[in-house]
Amino acid sequence: MATRRSIFRIAVNMALDGLLAAAAVVAARLLLAPLADPVSPVWSVALGGVALLLAGLPFRLPFQYWRFAGSADLLAVGAASLTAAALFSLVLHAAGEASPSLTFPAVHGLCLVVLLAAPRIFYRLWQEGASGGDGAQPVLLVGAGEGADLFLRALAADRDAPYRVVGLLSLGQAQTGRRMHTCPILGSVDDAASVLARLREADSLPAALVVTEADWSGQQLAALMEVADKAGLRVARAPRLTALDPAGLRGDRLELKPVAIEDLLGRAQVPLDRAGIARLVQGRRVVVTGAGGSIGSELARQVAGLGPELLVLLDNGEFALWQIDLELGETLPGVARRAVLADVRDAARLRAVMQDVRPDLVFHAAALKHVPMVEANPLEALLTNAAGTRNVADAARAAGAAAMVVISTDKAVNPSSVMGASKRLAEMYCQGLDTAARHSGGMRCVTVRFGNVLGSTGSVVPLFQRQLARGGPLTVTHPDMQRYFMTVREAVGLVLAASVAGTTDAAAIPDGGIFVLDMGPPVKIVDLARQMIRLAGLRPEVDVGIHFTGLRPGEKLFEELFHGREPAVPTGTPGLLMATPRSVDPAIIGRAIDEIASACHGGQTRLALSVLGRMIPEFAHNADGTAAARA
């Protein structure tokens, strides 16, 4: 059926083009000799049609789709017209028929171009005007570049387009007043409030703002969302369209996409040393602890993509470990891997695993990280975060690993929680090991510190999403609460970059140096809550309320990436800074961890926390959530 329809359309095109070409001969004669008989001789009129059909074949004229006629099609029409005019004149000359005048070929060619191109243009304009019926939703496009062009083309290609563009907002001022596909550019994004006010006065307010530029994000997007929120409009993203796939259709309809919360961070993409990262992992035996968690699973994905000799996924959670193992088996079946159920608190089990695997590189992401949960179970956190980290480091070093990368947290800086203090103790042990290795050889320990990861298990974003699904309210502990945020993919990419820098550029790293990811400015949690409400197409404090609950045990208002004795030092790697904290002999830290572990096994919480406080003098435990937060 499709083939018959195509043949029929080609035949119709040929008939129409032939008739128009015949009319072009008559039109050219009339223009040159208005009083002459325009149809004499008749055979020459028919010859004009035949000449055009023959000339049009190399330029694919019969196969053109008039509804989508573009500049390339019109160029083909022009080339075919000139060729047909020349061919017509040659046949006339060969037949001994005199040309009406010396200028006839040029006039004939011009008539062909006009008569063939005009119907195509008018037909396309008519189809575009007919697309988007009365039910089409009016939208205002944000961006007046290639993305907007492709979006408008996709709408024009849809007879029942669900959207009707009332205008565009450019990203700069220079385009204001111009038009794109007959749609006016009403102003820049900085003029959004005034543009929407004018549209409201003209009773032409759109139902939504559609961002067409895929990489446009950050503070400008957040500001636009606030303007749209005040006007009662939602903001959405256009699908990613390309010149090769301009439709962007799902179910034959053009679908808008919601703005992701990650888009509001506005973080520039940090260039990574992909070649160096590949050399670090390729052909190596790699162990990832906590492989079922948010960071561990993303580490496993990125490491697996770099071609290790063997990837060992280690976790104590059966379901989480099964999930990442299954995923990698489906996406990267050629990568040799092993899923190992093990607890980092089990030193003997870790030693056996490491001796069996003999890893070259260990990424240690296993940890208990939820602050209130750790406050309720402090001994478990100390055994996992502090003693567990030492167990992994000692087992990896004994098995001959070249390097271990430890994932730490900004909560380790001036800690107010057991979680933060336990991670700081782990940092100190690994700092001591790395300092010793730098001077006497052995396994390098690279510590990487960063803040919250968007969407990770236990983070605030999934909590807000669940609360929104229930209709609110969204709960925020304090109106001044701030946190550093980063996407999990970005964080893991920088962890790998730090691993390369920490193992290949030792001379540039001070003893005990800790890599700190450049997290950008901190984000107020209440602002994040408001943005998520807007992303859901709702209005903060109107459709969904925000409820302040007060600080929880262990929390503080502001997290820090450096404390006073850790001056930030730039590194040669974009996105990475270096903290230079005090370093302690690992033997001293090891004895303290032994003492803490003994107290934990004996259920002596007060003793364990006392030793922890002795080792970390800056630990100001906010045990009940009421202590003054440190700025």
Image (tube, helix red, strand yellow):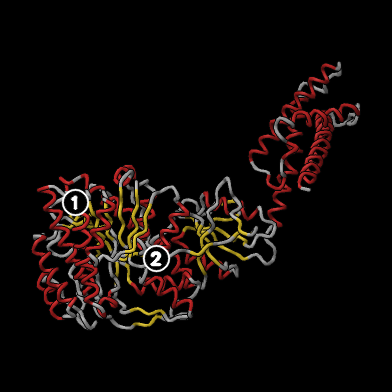
Q: Secondary structure at mark 2?
A: helix
Front tag of 1 and 2: 2
- Residue 268 x %, y %: 36, 54
- Residue 476 x %, y %: 35, 78
Q: Is the residue 472 above or below the residue 436 in the image?
A: below
Q: Is the residue 272 above or below the residue 314 in the image?
A: above
Disc 2 designates what residue?
A: 320
Say whether residue 164 is left or right of residue 47: left
From the viewer's side, name the closer residue of 592 and 260: 592
Disc 1 designates what residue?
A: 444
Quarter location, residue 599 = bottom left
Name which residue lies at 63% across and 40% down.
71
From the viewer's side, name the closer residue of 615 and 246: 615
Q: Amino acid at mark 1?
A: Arg
Q: Secondary structure at mark 1?
A: strand
Q: Residues within 10 Å of mark 1 (few under 14, many from 20)?
A: many
Q: Amino acid at mark 2?
A: Ala
Mark 2 or mark 1, which is nearer the start of the sequence? 2
- Residue 334 x %, y %: 43, 47
From the viewer's side, name the closer residue of 58 and 30: 58
Quadrant housing the C terminus: bottom left
